[in-house]
Image: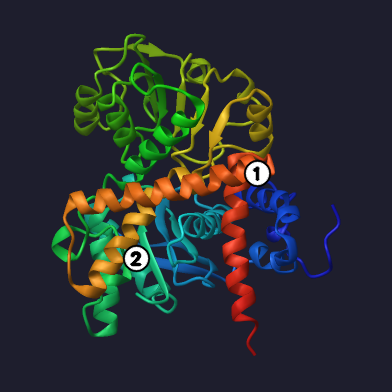
Amino acid sequence: MTYPAGIPSYLQADQLGPWGIYLQQVDRVIPYLGHLARWSETLKRPKRILIVDVPIHMDDGSVAHFEGYRVQHSTTRGPGKGGVRFHQDVTLSEVMALSAWMSIKNAAVNVPYGGAKGGIRVDPKTLSPGELERITRRYTSEIGIIIGPTKDIPAPDVNTNEQIMAWMMDTYSMNEGSTATGVVTGKPLALGGSLGRRDATGRGVFTVGVEAARHLGLEIAGSRVAVQGFGNVGGVAARLFAQAGARVVAVQDHGGTIYRDTGLDVPALLAHVAMTGTVAGFAQAEVMPSDHFWEVTCDIMIPAALETQITEHNAGRIKARMVIEGANGPTTPAADDILQARNILVVPDVIANAGGVTVSYFEWVQDFSSFFWSEDEINARLVRIIKEAFTSVWEVAQDKKVSLRTATFIVACSRILHARELRGLYP
């Protein structure tokens, strides 16, 4: 593929990595954008990329340096919005792609945000509590020049949680000279967090799964479910599917893969994971070789771990009627094509896991108004928004005869580019 002069390699679609996958997804949707296609290059270039050095004092007296990122893909429809992950394999390509998928996700469910994402390349398990706090606060200070309640609002992601959001909020507030609870979401309730936020992503996965199953004529009660990743997304989704009468027959996480044909005791497994940190060692299940997870006979498969898990190498082995993407970017474009050819419905991440950012939006609104809603009200609003978004995407998919992923991109990209066209270019 030949690119115009001046296009850096990290913006090119044939470069391996998550950003290249995102660009391929955008290229697939351009033919459906009509006159808005003239603005499509906007989608392929992040608005702002900030790479920061994060030096901290270690407990042994040494000074260590870590690399941090904050990428704002789009702020056309509102402030940037997206999580911060702490992981030893974080790369710029990954953070760029995640920020772009946040733009798509927010537009798909029609909340007034753009897309952003952040990360630090560090294994947080190697840090003491004090080191973890120092790296969080230093990173927040470094990116403080571009974040803010009306500019860019971080949230938890891989290996970050309510406590880290509390430190980020406090650091930003101290630097600003006033308490700014709306600078992050996913905070503790005592600092302006929202009820329902912790379960929101998993609840969104379940809600969109129920809607997709209804269109397929699949009964949730009695269906077989396999889940990869058993944290706040996969664990919550598994619990809700089990409560609806589904049998969760296989679960995989970083520690191993377990299986039980008659269905796992999900509450007991959640308790085991809370104690041990992994599904490995759960007594009421068989151990399964990890690579065999993709061959489990099931109705619904939920990849809810990291990106690029379903590829051309394992997509042909999947025995599910439906894949619901709880993780960001778990399926490559080549795998997408294989699954579609095999008539396996893929409910894409950009709508399937949008429950988290939807309730983050609720949290942000509540912080601005200093008026907080009940959990029942939050869950009801979440379910309504997710159902409406899925219905819009399903109708476009049927009308255009495209996959749900392409349909979601059509809906989202049209909204982003329409806003771009209305705003124009300044100066």
Q: Is residue 17 left or right of residue 75?
A: right
Q: Which residue is mark 1?
A: 399
Return the residue nearer the eye: 416 or 285: 416
Please name the residue shown 67% across and 53% down the image. 26
| Residue 56's disc number | 2
Which residue is nearer to you in this view: 222 or 398? 398
Residue at x 24%, y 53% (from the top left corner)? 378
Residue 345 x %, y %: 56, 30
| Image-quadrant location for residue 74 | bottom right
Left or right, residue 190 beside residue 118: left
User: In front: 138, or 220?
Assistant: 220
Residue 279: percent from left, percent from top? 31, 25
Q: Is label 2 in a helix, a strand or a loop?
A: strand
- Residue type at mark 1? Asp
Helix, strand or loop at label 1? It is helix
Instruction: Tell me which label, 2 or 1, sits earlier in the chain.
Output: 2
Can the viewer see residue 59 in this picture?
A: no
**What kind of residue is marked 2?**
Ile
Query: Where residue 262 sits: x, y (%)?
Result: 32, 9
Between the residue at mark 2 and the residue at mark 1, the CA separation in whole angstroms equals 54 Å
Residue 96 seen by the camera = yes
Considering only vertical position in the picture, is 368 above or below 116?
below
